[in-house]
Image (cartoon, grey):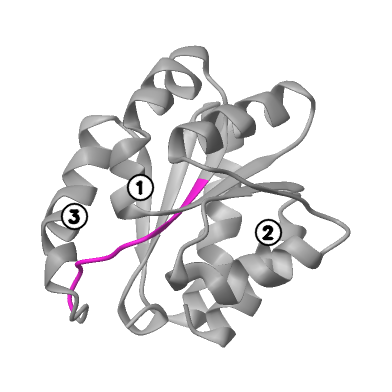
Amino acid sequence: MNVEAARAAHQALLKSGVNFVACLPDSAFQELYVPLSADPEITYVQVASENDGVGVCMGAWLGGMKPALLVENTGFTLGTYALLRGPMAFGVPMLLLISHRGDLGDERWFSVPFGWGTKPLLDSMRITHRSVERAQDVSAAIGNAVKSMNSMQAPVAILFAGEILF
């Protein structure tokens, strides 16, 4: 994630009231999770798996916090069971910030199948999502996603791609 997009995302999370972030570290999000982990206004939890991240975010919401999960799309596919079994079944709002590996511009050939499958998987799970490719669109996308997740009482996803990642 480029530095400009990471700064915009950080500020948008704070402005929208997100105060809990779980993250399975991913090189695409390093510019975002390092500052988040040092921010005293954010409770930051590094997790060992995507399923753990979903569970921790669900627990944070039950405890009165507003959670976000940072995850690569390859990991999102692994977390689908936890999402369906928890937040989707029980109506728990959660912001999913997903690096869209394998999208146009990604030169990692082994990520391409995940690029193909991410949006159809989100659609099949009925998770509202938006793809963001320019740093200047990050703030509005996060703000709108948080509003939607709160009104729908369900997970909402932002996919980061294009010049933001590649």
Check whether the beta carbons of the residues at disc 2 and disc 1 lie within 8 A of each other: no
Give the class, few, some or many, for how many residues have Cα within 10 Å of label 2's Cα (few <14, many ≥20): many
Q: Residue at x 52, y 19 (%)?
A: 91
Q: Residue furthest front?
A: 48
Q: Residue at x 23, y 50 (%)?
A: 118
28 within the magenta span? no
Is 13 placed above or below 45 here? below
Mark 3 or mark 1, which is nearer the start of the sequence? 1
Check whether the beta carbons of the residues at disc 2 and disc 3 lie within 8 A of each other: no
Helix, strand or loop at label 3? It is: helix
Horizontal and vertical percent for residue 54? 52, 33
Q: Which mark is residue 75?
A: 1
Return the residue at label 2: 13
User: How far apart are the two marked residues, 2 and 3, measured between alpha carbons?
Assistant: 26 Å
Amino acid under label 1?
A: Gly
Q: Looking at this view, is 59 or 147 the one in front?
A: 59
Return the residue at label 3: 114
Give the class, few, some or many, for how many residues have Cα within 10 Å of label 1's Cα (few <14, many ≥20): some
Q: Looking at this view, is 137 or 92 the one in front?
A: 92
Q: Nearer the viewer, mark 2 or mark 1?
A: 1
Mark 3 or mark 2, which is nearer the start of the sequence? 2
Horizontal and vertical percent for residue 53? 54, 38
**Which quadrant of the structure image shows residue 3?**
bottom right
Segment tinted magenta in the rendering: 96-104
Amino acid under label 3?
A: Phe
